[in-house]
Image (cartoon, rainbow, N blue to C red):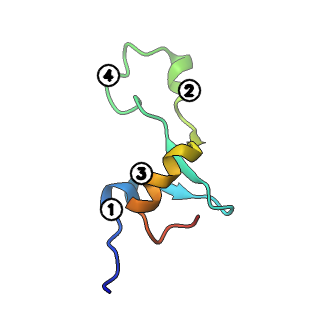
Amino acid sequence: MPKMKTNSSSKKRFRFTGTGKAKRASARKSHILTKKTTKMKRRLRGTSVIDKTNMIGLARLMPYGRR
């Protein structure tokens, strides 16, 4: 059986922590930043861990990522 391909868009969007959780960047930070408050832009800077319910779908997209 051939190897499964990793989804390229997922590869760029998610990183795995040492314990196997997936990190993601916050949305709404790429354009139209003039109308967003400084507080909102500061809050969107960091990363967050994705929910465990979404890990099942991510496991299909990234079969060789850590779990």
Which SS class for mark 3? Answer: helix
Residue shown at the point (56%, 18%) measured from the top left:
39
Identify the residue position indicated by label 1 in the image. Answer: 7
Q: Position of residue 9 (x, y in %)?
A: 32, 55
Categorize mark 4 by other alpha carbons within 10 Å: few (<14), some (14-19), many (20+): few
Categorize mark 2 by other alpha carbons within 10 Å: few (<14), some (14-19), many (20+): few
Q: CB atoms at circles 2 and 3 under 8 Å apart?
A: no
Residue type pointed to by label 2: Arg
Identify the residue position indicated by label 2 in the image. Answer: 42
Q: Which residue lies furthest to the front in this view?
A: 1
Q: Which residue lies furthest to the bottom in this view?
A: 1
Mark 2–mark 3 Cα distance, whole angstroms, equals 20 Å
Q: CB atoms at circles 1 and 3 under 8 Å apart?
A: no
Residue shown at the point (56%, 26%) measured from the top left:
42
In the displayed structure, would residue 65 be above or below residue 37?
below
Identify the residue position indicated by label 3 in the image. Answer: 13
Residue type pointed to by label 3: Arg
